[in-house]
Amino acid sequence: MRNPFSIDAKVRRTVEAVNSARQCRPLDSRFLLKGVTLASLLAGGIVLLASRYSIAIATQEALCLPPYRVWVIDKADTTPVRGGTFAFKAKGLQPVFPDGTNIVKVMVGLPGDEVSVTEATTAINGEVVGNGLAVATERNLDIARYVRHGRIEIERYWFMGRTQDSFDSRYWGSVARSQLWGRAYPLW
């Protein structure tokens, strides 16, 4: 007769319990239903987020909107707001930016606003929004070609960076509404 309190008996019971736990059991249909539902909700949420939001990363060395390099873009919000930060797709800005490049700048001018670009300042409706033409000076470009006065056309917007060496509307003019990608929010 075996002693039920012996070490051998305890080891045997433990081995039997482990083997029993290792045996495959059929999956419970409620467990499967919950798993499929959760996976579907998660996948749907990811698709929904990706359809509305994107990430933009500034890869240039000198940032025009310091200190931020990474932005979340709300593609559903393209309503123009003076002072709002927006992302738009570059068009006709070669060789600095190839067409389709995502650019993030501050919207400082709206349709109908009076714009004045001189060698010293850039002004919207008489208010200075930028100083100098540092990019033209750095690249030995003819500064006179950027000096101009006029009104921003309908469905077009004026964008500026926060630094003097920002390549912005001072050099390439206004941006069409069709190029707006969405409102930009800084991450870091």
Image (tube, helix red, strand yellow):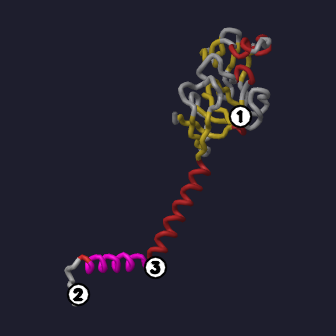
User: Which three-letter amino acid code belongs to the residue tagged 3?
Assistant: Cys
Q: Nearer the viewer, residue 145 or 123?
A: 145
Q: Nearer the viewer, mark 3 or mark 2?
A: 2
Give the label, 1 or 2, closer to the camera: 2
Residue highlighted by disc 2: 2
Count of marks overlaid on the render: 3
Q: Residue at x 73, y 20 (%)?
A: 171
Three-letter amino acid code at the position of disc 2: Arg
Q: Is residue 84 above or below residue 36?
A: above
Q: Secondary structure at mark 1?
A: loop
Q: Is residue 183 left or right of residue 145?
A: left
50 w.r.t. 10: above or below: above
Residue 107 higher or lower than 124, as above or below: below
User: Which quarter of the figure is the N terminus placed in?
Assistant: bottom left
Q: Residue furthest top?
A: 120
Q: Residue at x 52, y 62 (%)?
A: 41
Report the span colored magenta. 8-27
Specify whether residue 24 is painted magenta: yes
Q: Measure the C-alpha gap from mark 1 to mark 3.
A: 65 Å
Along the polypeptide, which appears first: circle 3 or circle 2? 2
Where in the figure is residue 39, as x and y percent of width and height? 52, 64
- Identify the residue position indicated by label 3 in the image: 24
176 lies above or below 150: below
The residue to which callout 1 is attached is 155
Name the amino acid type tagged 1.
Glu
